[in-house]
Image (cartoon, coloured by chain):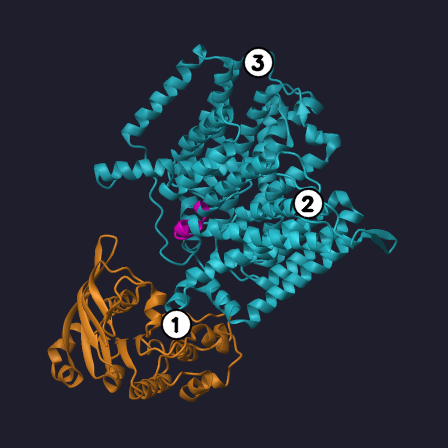
Chain colours: A orange, B cyan
Amino acid sequence: MLRVSGLSAHYGRAHILEDVALEVAAGEVVVLLGRNGAGKSTTMKAIMGLVPSSAGRVEFDGAEITGREPFEIARRGLGYVPEERRIFTELTVLENLEVGRRPAMAGQAPWTPARLFELFPSLGRMQDRAGGRMSGGEQQMLTIARTLMGNPRLILLDEPSEGLAPVVVERMAEAIVTLKASGLGILLSEQNLHFARGVSDRATIIEKGRIRWSGTIPALLEAEEVREQYLSV
Amino acid sequence: MASGLTVIFGVSRIVNFAHGSFYMLGAYLAWTLVTSLPRGHLGFWGGVLGAALLVGVIGLVVEMLLLRRIYRAPELFQLLATFGVVLVVQDVALLTWGAQDLLGPRAPGLRGSTEILGLRFPLYELFLIVVGPVVLGLLLLLFHRTRWGTLVRAATQDREMVGALGVNQRMLFTSVFFLGSVLAGLGGALQLPRESVNLHMDLAIITEAFVVVVVGGLGSLSGAALAALLIGELHAFGILVFPKITLVLVFLVMAVVLVVRPHGLRGKPQPAAHGVAAAEPMIGAAPRALKLAGAVGLALAVALPPFLGDYALTVLTEIAICILFAASLHLIMGPGGMASFGHAAYFGLGAYGAALAATWLGVPMLGGMLLAPVLAGIFGVVFGWFCVRLSGVYSAMLTLAFAQIAWSVAFQWVEVTGGDNGILGVWPDAWAAGKLTYYYLALALCLGGTLLLRRVVHAPFGYALRAQRDSALRAEAIGIDAFRIRWWGFTLAAVAAGVAGGLFAYGKGSVFPTYLAIPRSVDALLMVLLGGVQTLTGPIIGAIAYTGLQEQLMRLLEYWRLVLGAVIILLVLFFPQGLAGAARAMWERRHGDA
């Protein structure tokens, strides 16, 4: 459903992404693994059109979306959940969801605030609270919920477990599994292998802006030297 | 009006001078429509609303053609571009409606007046006092109860994220600008029965609106509503009760609010400038070629004048003064990292200091010239104390407000300052009365002052100033008292501007309130921006280019503002780093990185 090939990006003269290639199918969870600063977030931003790419091609649902405006990409059904969460702090939970709302495509069961509160019950208990007065975990749930309100068919989920308490990470994993079961494709970025292995089908390892390894989760668990080289801190 | 400004400002973070022009256009268009439509209710109210809508359309065009291209440019350039629009609009209005004040008809049905507490209030004033809050109430509803409003509020905080959620934020933005322009136009149109329509409405109102925005808190609608109510009522009643001190009242309110709540009534601390904060280029010693060029320029400036006529000498003297004036502003803006929209205050105070010394105390010229920077410096200390507490646009607006206050004092305190007629007969002493001698005097003082300012930037004080600009927090962590440094910088700039003002006063032989007025502040701003903020040479080149350009255009063309405005807009679009910046970029491209 999402196919990226040869994607490169620069900040000034520095190469930050070089020849990145990956693929995500509908209902599949692919994890982009790598250390801090490896290029995970930049890959996602480049796919989303938030960082200009200097070469390469991004296809979504059979159509090329390279170089399109972020809002056009989002309207095609590609959702983005940023690492920094970027909650609208002045807006309430319900208003945050309203900003993300977009009509569903044919044959999709549209997300509503009520359905999202089933997925994230704690949000349902604070519908009128301002986004700025929520805990980190609650904000993370709200960002995911906000993106889901756009009824995407695939989401880019940037480090959802970062800085969260173990109990909340557990919650997040459950939510990802539920979403995957509903047919949503997910490109997940993570440093936390333990979290990623529980929810993902395949893994792609990125370092210094290049893809170093790709394969299934079981294959990654076998390949100790790969984990040693690219993931150990 | 202020609500229109806050709306636009909140979402776009574009400081928009042109808003005042839209207000003025609203008034003019309303005049045309109302006087050409049949008399009666329909003609009047239809004309007012029609004018507002027309202004909205004009705003739309400006936004799409100009502003869209420069959203990524630094704030000050956006400001410069909108000022270009102001100039163009002024001349278009002059071309279309002429220079005379136009008087509109009274509003049908609201001609009378009524008595409240023994004072007579015209009905129309009361109507306006009611309309303001109603419009604000509607706006609040719009922003809090509709999807559009929710999107706008979200975009205020994070436009990119709103875009990533599938909202066409550019369209959203354009619609906001349209609404803001309509409101500005409506505000202007509604003034029609109250006061004559004239060409000075644009800058007068923008000051007031900035004050409201600052008092209310940037980006906070409810704050702006509160402030607009407060200030509006203060004005409406104040003008009737104590007409002379309204401005002082407003100023007092603003000062109190800002001291108690530095970010306005409902404002929040501004997030540190987000996005890629490009590191300001380093300021090094001048390369040899530049020194050479400077030496040649100086040699010409010294050697040529004896062969020039009086007119050329006057222009050259003015240019020398402008260089010092621009350089003093540059100290605040470039190394200091603070924007000042009201730098003319210190220039004008210097001029008045000299003039008052000459006429009231009868001191000779040198004494007057000494008093000029002293007066400017004293006010620099006082105003600076307020201004440097804030940062960014807040501080800039505050400087503007102070300048406006200084102007109105000069304008209204007729007994001392002569009001609109100014102070005449401020002539230099006999030994310096010759145009040539005076030119050399001005050249020496201005060049000396400019070089001194340049030296300051390279002194430890200059390092501290730049350090606090780049990161106030880190500068404080290594023991720099950022507040004090900024305060000193501000005062120093005021003193230098005062010197320039004093020279100017003796050069012209007279002083007028326009010396302190906004257009002169903007002149300085333009010189600095035109030249480039982050180069030391910038203000010098900018002052020469701007003064020269203006002088030539004024001589050759009746509608020089139109051309000047267009030139400014083009410069912003094509030379976003200013002239000196562009020259340096070219130099670096050719010679590798400096």
What secondary structure prevails in the magenta region? helix
C-alpha span from label 1 to label 2: 55 Å
Residue B75 is covered by the magenta coloring: yes
Disc 3 versus disc 1: nearer the observer? 1
From the viewer's side, name the closer residue of B268 and B108. B108
- B243 on left or right of A212: right
Per the rendered image, the range of residues in magenta is B67-77
Q: Does residue B265 appear anywhere in the picture? A: no
Tag 2 residue: B35
Amino acid type for the residue under numbered disc 1:
Arg
From the viewer's side, name the closer residue of A18 and A102. A102
Circle 1: element type:
loop
Residue B387 in percent (x, y) is at 56, 47
Q: Does residue A23 appear anywhere in the picture? A: yes
Tag 1 residue: A85
Tag 3 residue: B433
Judging from the image, mark 3 belongs to the subunit labelled: B
* Tags 1 and 2 touching, CB below 8 Å: no
Give the farthest residue toward the front.
B38
Disc 1 versus disc 2: nearer the observer? 2
Give a yes or no on whether discs 3 and 1 share a subunit. no
Residue B515 in percent (x, y) is at 60, 32
Judging from the image, mark 2 belongs to the subunit labelled: B
